[in-house]
C-alpha cells in the first residue's frame, strides 16, 4: 500500500511499452513484455523502515475500520443468536463400535427430515457452540494437541486462531447466505419470478486428518452446520487424545439433531462408507481418497476431497530473496512439514540459486537455532512409519547426488527429523516424485522461470503454487499457465488462513472447496424456484396446441431474446 518494490518500478521504466507479444512458448494467452536487462537482482529498503511502514499501515487500517464497526456492530449483535447448551438427553451421540453406526445415522436422518436443522436460530446456536467449545476448554484442547503431536504452542495458536476466524466469518454472514438469490426472469415467463433457494444436502460425513485435527474437523463441520445439514464426524484414529477430546466436549455444545461422532479406525470407517450419505468430505492422502472414491462409486454419493500434491515455489531473479527465504522456511517447516499446502520444492533461476540457498540456511538457523531438536518452536514427526518414509527419501536423494545444505547436529531419531534443505536435486529422485509431507526441501536450479514452469506443468496439478517475483509478467504467467488449487504471489500457504476465499484443489489435489461462502454452498443444493400466477395467461394464443407456423415463429422470436 505504501511501498512498491523498486525492482518493479525500474523494470517498468526500462520496458518498451510497445514491445509486447501474446502467447509464447507455452502457448498461453498472456501478455509478455520483453524487459531489457536489469543489473540488480532486486532492490529493497532497510528492514527497520519496512517494519515502520507495516505498523503505519496497520494503524491506518484500524482507524478506517472503527466507524464501520460502530455502524455494523448492532446489526451483528441482533443477528447473532444467544447460545443455548444442549439439554440433557439431547446431546450429540458418540459411537465407538461398528454395530451402533447404522442406527445412529438413521436417527440423524429422521431428525433432518423433521426439519429441526433448517432454522437460522438453530444453525447459529450450533456455530456459536463450536466457538465456545474452543474458547472455554483451551487448556484441555492444547493438552490433547501436544499429547498427540508434540507440537509447539505457536502451531496450536495458529490453528486455533484460524478455526475461530472461520467460525466468526460464518456466523457474521450466515443470515445473508441463507437468503434466496433472485435471478432475472425472461419477459415471456413474466409476471412470474425466479430465484435460487439454498437447500441443505442432508446427512453428511466428514472424515478428518491427523495433521491439523482441530481446524480440519471443526471448519468443515461449521460449513455443514451453517448449510443446515447434520453431520457424522470421524476424527483421525491417529489422534487418540484429540478424538477423545472431541467425543467428550462436542456433545456439551452441539445437540443430537446436529452431530454424531464415530471413533475408531479402519473397520469403523469401512462401515461408514457402506452407508449412503448425502455428501462426503474427506481430508487426507490421495491413496485413501481413491479407496473412498471406489467404495462409494456405486451409490452416486457426491464427494469433496481435500488432498495435497507437490506445491512448487518458482523464484526469479527479481525476487526479494531474504523475504522469500523467510516465508518459505516458516511455512515449509511449521508442523514439521506435515501441511498439505507447504512448499514441496523450489525451482529458482540459476543466477540467484546460491544466494537463495544461503538465505534459506540462514533463516533455518535463525528460526530453530543450530540444533532444532532443542528448539521449542519445532514440531515432531507423527510416528516411526513417517520417520522411515522421510529417511528413505533423504537417503535416496543423497545417493543420487543431492547435497544436504543444513546438516543437523542431532541425527534423526525419536520422532525428530531435522529441517533439511537439499541442493543439486533432480527429477529422478523419489523426493521429487512423491509428496514429501515432511521437513525436506529440495532446491532445483533452472535457467528461466519459463523453464521452471515447464517442469511444473509436467507434474500433476498441486493444491497450491507459489511464485516470488516483482515482475508483473511472471505473476500473470504463473497464475494463468500453472493449474493448481490456488496461486500465491510473494508468500506461501497463508491464503488458507483467509475465511473468505475458497480452499480446495483440482485433479489429484482434490475436488470441491470450502471456507466461508464456498463452504456454505458445498453443503447446499442450489434449487431453482419459479413462481407464476394464474390471473394472466398472456401467451395462451401461442403457448398451447394446436400448433402452426405462426405460433412457432412467434415463440422463436420471443424465446430467442434475453429481453
Image: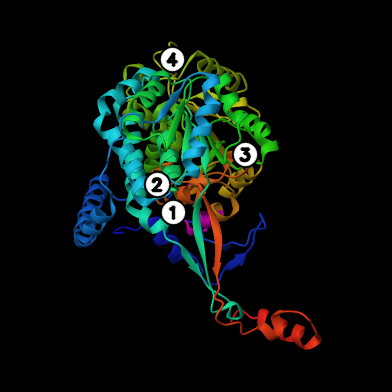
- Residue 559 belongs to magenta span: no
Circle 1 residue: 470
As drawn, 155 above or below 481: above
Figure quadrant of residue 392: top right
Q: Position of residue 314 (x, y in %)?
A: 52, 44
Query: Answer yes or no: do the residues labelled 2 and 3 have beta carbons within 8 Å?
Result: no
Q: Earlier in the sequence, mark 4 or mark 1?
A: 4
User: What residue did someone put label 3 on?
Assistant: 508
Give the class, few, some or many, for how many residues have Cα within 10 Å of label 1's Cα (few <14, many ≥20): many
Q: Where residue 354 sits: x, y (%)?
A: 47, 35
Q: Of tags 4 and 2, which is closer to the observer?
A: 4
Q: Which mark is residue 320?
A: 2
Residue ID for mark 4: 415
Which residue sits at x=32%, y=24%? Answer: 152
* Residue 521, x across and y down, in percent: 49, 51
Mark toward the viewer: 2 or 3: 3
Is the residue marked by circle 2 packed among few (<14), some (14-19), or many (20+) residues within 10 Å? many
What residue is shown at x 40% (from left), y 20% (from top)? 380
Q: How far apart, in angstroms, are the residues tagged by discs 3 and 1?
A: 30 Å
Q: Nearer the viewer, residue 383 or 88?
A: 88
| The C terminus lies in quadrant | bottom right
Amino acid at each position: 500500500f505504501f511501498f512498491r518494490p523498486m525492482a518493479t518500478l525500474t523494470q517498468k521504466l526500462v520496458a518498451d511499452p510497445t514491445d509486447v507479444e501474446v502467447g509464447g512458448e507455452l502457448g498461453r494467452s498472456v501478455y509478455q513484455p520483453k524487459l531489457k536487462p536489469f543489473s540488480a537482482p532486486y532492490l529493497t529498503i532497510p528492514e527497520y523502515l519496512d517494519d515502520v511502514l507495516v505498523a503505519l499501515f496497520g494503524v491506518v487500517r484500524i482507524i478506517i475500520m472503527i466507524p464501520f464497526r460502530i455502524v455494523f456492530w448492532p446489526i451483528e449483535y441482533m443477528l447473532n443468536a444467544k447460545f443455548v447448551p444442549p439439554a440433557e438427553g439431547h446431546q450429540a451421540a458418540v459411537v465407538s463400535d461398528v454395530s451402533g453406526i447404522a442406527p445412529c445415522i438413521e436417527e440423524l436422518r429422521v431428525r433432518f427430515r423433521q426439519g429441526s436443522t433448517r432454522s437460522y436460530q438453530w444453525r447459529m446456536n450450533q456455530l456459536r457452540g463450536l466457538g465456545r467449545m474452543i474458547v472455554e476448554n483451551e487448556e484441555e484442547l492444547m493438552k490433547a494437541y501436544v499429547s498427540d503431536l508434540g507440537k509447539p504452542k505457536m502451531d496450536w495458536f495458529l490453528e486455533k486462531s484460524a478455526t475461530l476466524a472461520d467460525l466468526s466469518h460464518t456466523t457474521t454472514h450466515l443470515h445473508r447466505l441463507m437468503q434466496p438469490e433472485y435471478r432475472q426472469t425472461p419477459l415471456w415467463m413474466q409476471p412470474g419470478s425466479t430465484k435460487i433457494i439454498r437447500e441443505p444436502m442432508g446427512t453428511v460425513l466428514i472424515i478428518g486428518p491427523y495433521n491439523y485435527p482441530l481446524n480440519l474437523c471443526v471448519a468443515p463441520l461449521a460449513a455443514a452446520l451453517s448449510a443446515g445439514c447434520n453431520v457424522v464426524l470421524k476424527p483421525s484414529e491417529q489422534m487418540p487424545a484429540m478424538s477423545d477430546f472431541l467425543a467428550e466436549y462436542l456433545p456439551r455444545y452441539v445437540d443430537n439433531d446436529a452431530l454424531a461422532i464415530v471413533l475408531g479406525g479402519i473397520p469403523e470407517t469401512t462401515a461408514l462408507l457402506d452407508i449412503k450419505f448425502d455428501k462426503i468430505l474427506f481430508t487426507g492422502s490421495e491413496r485413501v481418497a481413491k479407496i473412498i472414491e471406489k467404495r462409494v462409486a456405486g451409490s452416486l454419493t457426491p464427494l469433496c476431497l481435500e488432498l495435497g500434491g507437490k506445491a512448487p515455489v518458482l523464484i526469479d531473479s527479481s525476487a526479494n530473496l531474504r523475504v522469500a527465504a523467510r516465508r518459505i522456511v516458516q511455512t515449509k517447516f511449521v508442523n514439521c512439514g506435515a501441511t498439505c499446502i507447504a512448499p514441496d520444492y523450489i525451482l529458482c533461476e540459476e543466477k540467484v540459486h546460491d544466494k537463495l540457498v544461503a538465505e534459506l540456511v540462514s533463516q533455518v538457523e535463525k528460526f530453530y537455532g543450530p540444533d532444532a531438536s532443542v528448539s521449542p518452536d519445532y514440531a515432531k514427526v507423527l510416528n516411526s512409519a513417517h520417520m522411515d518414509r522421510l529417511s528413505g527419501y533423504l537417503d535416496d536423494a543423497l545417493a543420487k547426488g543431492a547435497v544436504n545444505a543444513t546438516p543437523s547436529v542431532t541425527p534423526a531419531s525419536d520422532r525428530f527429523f531435522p529441517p533439511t534443505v537439499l541442493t543439486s536435486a533432480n527429477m529422478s529422485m523419489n523426493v521429487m516424485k512423491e509428496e514429501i509431507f515432511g521437513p525436506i526441501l529440495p532446491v532445483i536450479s533452472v535457467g528461466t522461470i519459463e523453464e521452471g514452469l515447464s517442469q511444473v506443468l509436467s507434474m500433476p496439478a498441486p493444491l497450491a503454487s507459489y511464485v516470488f517475483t516483482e515482475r508483473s509478467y511472471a505473476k500473470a504467467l504463473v497464475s494463468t499457465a500453472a493449474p493448481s488449487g490456488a496461486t500465491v504471489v510473494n508468500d506461501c500457504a497463508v491464503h488458507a488462513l483467509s475465511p473468505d476465499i475458497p480452499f480446495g484443489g483440482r485433479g489429484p489435489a482434490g475436488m470441491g472447496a470450502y471456507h466461508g461462502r464456498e463452504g456454505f454452498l458445498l453443503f447446499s443444493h442450489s434449487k431453482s424456484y419459479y413462481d407464476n400466477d394464474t390471473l394472466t395467461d398472456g401467451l395462451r394464443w401461442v403457448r398451447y396446441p394446436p400448433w402452426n407456423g405462426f405460433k412457432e415463429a412467434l415463440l422463436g422470436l420471443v424465446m430467442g431474446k434475453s429481453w
